[in-house]
Image (cartoon, rainbow, N blue to C red):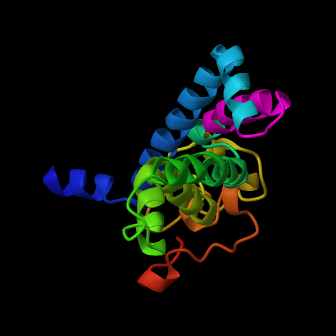
Amino acid sequence: MIKKFHSWVSHRSFGLFVLRLVAGFVFISHGTDTLLNIPEATQFFAQIHLAPFFVYLVGWSQVVFGALLVLGLFTRIAAIPLLIIALMAIILVKGPFTLSAIAGFNPAVLTPWFKIRAVFAQSEGEISLIAMCLALITMGSGCWSLARFCRCKCHKNGGERCGVCHVIGCDDCGGCDTCSVSHTHHSHEGHTHA
Protein backbone atom coordinates (compact mmCIF):
# COMPACT_ATOMS: atom_id res chain seq x y z
CA MET A 1 0.00 0.00 0.00
CA ILE A 2 2.82 2.42 0.87
CA LYS A 3 4.55 1.54 -2.39
CA LYS A 4 1.37 2.27 -4.34
CA PHE A 5 0.92 5.60 -2.52
CA HIS A 6 4.55 6.51 -3.26
CA SER A 7 4.18 5.74 -6.96
CA TRP A 8 0.97 7.78 -7.06
CA VAL A 9 2.48 10.83 -5.31
CA SER A 10 5.81 10.65 -7.15
CA HIS A 11 4.10 10.60 -10.55
CA ARG A 12 4.92 13.65 -12.65
CA SER A 13 1.24 14.36 -13.29
CA PHE A 14 0.58 14.72 -9.57
CA GLY A 15 3.17 17.50 -9.38
CA LEU A 16 1.71 19.22 -12.44
CA PHE A 17 -1.77 18.88 -10.96
CA VAL A 18 -0.65 20.63 -7.76
CA LEU A 19 1.12 23.37 -9.76
CA ARG A 20 -1.97 23.93 -11.90
CA LEU A 21 -4.31 24.10 -8.91
CA VAL A 22 -2.16 26.48 -6.87
CA ALA A 23 -1.30 28.82 -9.75
CA GLY A 24 -4.82 28.70 -11.17
CA PHE A 25 -6.55 29.49 -7.88
CA VAL A 26 -4.08 32.29 -7.06
CA PHE A 27 -4.76 33.93 -10.42
CA ILE A 28 -8.52 33.39 -10.13
CA SER A 29 -8.44 34.97 -6.67
CA HIS A 30 -6.51 38.02 -7.88
CA GLY A 31 -8.69 38.40 -10.95
CA THR A 32 -11.92 38.09 -8.97
CA ASP A 33 -10.67 40.64 -6.46
CA THR A 34 -9.88 43.03 -9.30
CA LEU A 35 -13.25 42.58 -11.00
CA LEU A 36 -15.22 42.91 -7.75
CA ASN A 37 -13.45 46.17 -6.88
CA ILE A 38 -13.45 48.02 -10.20
CA PRO A 39 -13.31 51.60 -8.76
CA GLU A 40 -10.35 50.82 -6.49
CA ALA A 41 -8.61 48.80 -9.19
CA THR A 42 -9.12 51.58 -11.74
CA GLN A 43 -7.61 54.10 -9.33
CA PHE A 44 -4.65 51.80 -8.66
CA PHE A 45 -4.08 51.19 -12.38
CA ALA A 46 -4.16 54.97 -12.96
CA GLN A 47 -1.30 55.32 -10.45
CA ILE A 48 0.86 53.08 -12.64
CA HIS A 49 -0.29 54.93 -15.78
CA LEU A 50 -2.57 52.22 -17.22
CA ALA A 51 -5.96 52.96 -18.76
CA PRO A 52 -9.15 51.59 -17.13
CA PHE A 53 -9.39 49.10 -20.01
CA PHE A 54 -6.47 47.18 -18.46
CA VAL A 55 -8.44 46.60 -15.25
CA TYR A 56 -10.92 44.49 -17.20
CA LEU A 57 -8.26 42.91 -19.42
CA VAL A 58 -6.07 41.83 -16.50
CA GLY A 59 -8.99 40.81 -14.27
CA TRP A 60 -10.75 38.68 -16.88
CA SER A 61 -7.46 37.22 -18.13
CA GLN A 62 -6.59 36.07 -14.63
CA VAL A 63 -10.02 34.52 -14.08
CA VAL A 64 -10.37 32.82 -17.48
CA PHE A 65 -6.80 31.61 -17.92
CA GLY A 66 -6.59 30.67 -14.22
CA ALA A 67 -9.71 28.52 -14.67
CA LEU A 68 -8.13 26.87 -17.71
CA LEU A 69 -5.09 26.01 -15.58
CA VAL A 70 -7.28 24.47 -12.88
CA LEU A 71 -9.17 22.40 -15.45
CA GLY A 72 -6.03 21.47 -17.35
CA LEU A 73 -7.28 22.76 -20.69
CA PHE A 74 -4.94 24.59 -23.07
CA THR A 75 -2.47 24.73 -20.17
CA ARG A 76 0.56 25.83 -22.15
CA ILE A 77 -1.36 28.59 -23.92
CA ALA A 78 -3.13 29.74 -20.73
CA ALA A 79 0.13 29.97 -18.77
CA ILE A 80 1.70 32.46 -21.23
CA PRO A 81 -0.56 35.50 -20.53
CA LEU A 82 -0.51 34.68 -16.82
CA LEU A 83 3.28 34.67 -16.86
CA ILE A 84 3.22 38.06 -18.61
CA ILE A 85 0.78 39.46 -16.00
CA ALA A 86 3.04 38.30 -13.14
CA LEU A 87 6.12 39.73 -14.86
CA MET A 88 4.40 43.06 -15.47
CA ALA A 89 3.32 43.16 -11.81
CA ILE A 90 7.01 43.09 -10.86
CA ILE A 91 8.06 45.64 -13.49
CA LEU A 92 5.18 48.12 -13.07
CA VAL A 93 4.18 47.68 -9.42
CA LYS A 94 6.53 45.85 -7.08
CA GLY A 95 9.79 47.22 -8.50
CA PRO A 96 8.91 50.94 -8.56
CA PHE A 97 7.05 50.88 -5.23
CA THR A 98 9.89 49.03 -3.50
CA LEU A 99 12.53 51.37 -4.91
CA SER A 100 10.55 54.46 -3.86
CA ALA A 101 10.04 52.99 -0.37
CA ILE A 102 13.77 52.46 0.17
CA ALA A 103 14.76 55.80 -1.40
CA GLY A 104 15.10 57.39 2.06
CA PHE A 105 17.63 54.81 3.24
CA ASN A 106 21.27 55.67 3.85
CA PRO A 107 22.90 56.16 0.39
CA ALA A 108 25.83 53.96 1.43
CA VAL A 109 23.39 51.05 1.85
CA LEU A 110 21.62 51.58 -1.48
CA THR A 111 23.96 49.55 -3.62
CA PRO A 112 22.59 47.97 -6.81
CA TRP A 113 22.71 44.55 -5.10
CA PHE A 114 20.65 45.88 -2.17
CA LYS A 115 18.03 47.26 -4.57
CA ILE A 116 17.80 43.96 -6.46
CA ARG A 117 17.42 42.04 -3.19
CA ALA A 118 14.73 44.46 -1.99
CA VAL A 119 12.70 44.09 -5.18
CA PHE A 120 13.17 40.32 -5.10
CA ALA A 121 11.99 40.16 -1.48
CA GLN A 122 8.84 42.12 -2.32
CA SER A 123 8.17 40.06 -5.45
CA GLU A 124 8.49 36.53 -4.08
CA GLY A 125 4.86 35.65 -4.87
CA GLU A 126 5.08 36.88 -8.45
CA ILE A 127 8.43 35.17 -8.98
CA SER A 128 6.92 31.91 -7.73
CA LEU A 129 3.97 32.31 -10.11
CA ILE A 130 6.37 32.97 -13.00
CA ALA A 131 8.27 29.78 -12.14
CA MET A 132 5.01 27.81 -11.99
CA CYS A 133 3.89 29.19 -15.36
CA LEU A 134 7.27 28.36 -16.93
CA ALA A 135 7.01 24.80 -15.63
CA LEU A 136 3.48 24.45 -17.04
CA ILE A 137 4.50 25.97 -20.39
CA THR A 138 7.34 23.48 -20.76
CA MET A 139 5.61 20.39 -19.32
CA GLY A 140 1.91 20.80 -20.10
CA SER A 141 -1.03 19.83 -17.93
CA GLY A 142 -0.23 16.19 -17.09
CA CYS A 143 -2.58 13.22 -17.05
CA TRP A 144 -4.80 14.60 -14.30
CA SER A 145 -6.53 17.13 -16.54
CA LEU A 146 -9.50 17.56 -18.84
CA ALA A 147 -7.06 17.83 -21.74
CA ARG A 148 -6.70 14.08 -21.47
CA PHE A 149 -10.23 13.72 -22.82
CA CYS A 150 -9.95 16.08 -25.79
CA ARG A 151 -10.26 14.78 -29.32
CA CYS A 152 -6.86 15.59 -30.74
CA LYS A 153 -4.91 13.23 -32.99
CA CYS A 154 -3.39 11.46 -29.96
CA HIS A 155 -6.78 10.10 -28.95
CA LYS A 156 -8.31 9.16 -32.30
CA ASN A 157 -8.76 5.42 -32.64
CA GLY A 158 -7.72 4.89 -29.04
CA GLY A 159 -4.25 6.43 -29.35
CA GLU A 160 -1.23 4.76 -27.82
CA ARG A 161 -1.26 3.31 -24.32
CA CYS A 162 1.87 4.11 -22.36
CA GLY A 163 3.73 1.10 -20.99
CA VAL A 164 4.60 2.96 -17.78
CA CYS A 165 1.61 5.05 -16.76
CA HIS A 166 -0.96 3.09 -18.83
CA VAL A 167 -2.79 6.23 -19.93
CA ILE A 168 -3.87 6.62 -23.52
CA GLY A 169 -2.25 9.67 -25.09
CA CYS A 170 -1.36 11.32 -21.77
CA ASP A 171 0.65 14.51 -21.52
CA ASP A 172 3.59 12.56 -20.16
CA CYS A 173 3.74 10.74 -23.49
CA GLY A 174 3.03 13.67 -25.80
CA GLY A 175 -0.74 13.78 -25.38
CA CYS A 176 -3.24 16.54 -25.89
CA ASP A 177 -1.17 19.47 -24.74
CA THR A 178 1.81 18.32 -26.77
CA CYS A 179 0.39 16.83 -29.97
CA SER A 180 3.38 18.02 -31.94
CA VAL A 181 5.71 15.95 -29.76
CA SER A 182 6.20 12.29 -30.59
CA HIS A 183 5.33 9.58 -28.07
CA THR A 184 8.84 9.12 -26.66
CA HIS A 185 8.52 10.45 -23.11
CA HIS A 186 9.49 7.25 -21.35
CA SER A 187 12.09 6.02 -23.85
CA HIS A 188 14.94 7.66 -21.91
CA GLU A 189 13.91 5.68 -18.84
CA GLY A 190 14.29 2.39 -20.66
CA HIS A 191 10.54 1.89 -21.04
CA THR A 192 8.61 1.49 -24.25
CA HIS A 193 5.00 1.90 -25.19
CA ALA A 194 2.91 -1.24 -25.04
Query: How many numbered discs?
Result: 0
Residue 170 in view in this figure: no
Identify which residue, 181 or 99, lies in the foreground. 99
Q: Residue at x 68, y 38 (%)?
A: 65
Q: Residue at x 42, y 82 (%)?
A: 189
Q: Is residue 52 magenta?
A: yes
Would residue 166 appear left or right of 60 to someone viewing this image? left
Would residue 191 appear left or right of 51 to someone viewing this image? left
Q: Residue at x 31, y 53 (%)?
A: 8
Identify which residue, 16 or 79, lies in the foreground. 79
Q: Residue at x 63, y 72 (%)?
A: 183
**Quadrant in the picture for residue 34:** top right
Would residue 14 appear left or right of 23 to someone viewing this image? left
Identify which residue, 4 or 42, lies in the foreground. 42
Residue 115 percent across, percent down from the top left: 47, 64
Residue 138 percent across, percent down from the top left: 60, 66
**Start-end of magenta stretch:** 48-67
Query: Residue at the left extreme?
Result: 2
Residue 26 in view in this figure: yes
Residue 139 percent across, percent down from the top left: 57, 63
Q: Is 134 situated above or below 38? A: below
Residue 68 percent across, percent down from the top left: 65, 38
Q: Is residue 17 magenta?
A: no
Task: State whether the magenta stretch is mostly helix, strand or loop.
Answer: helix
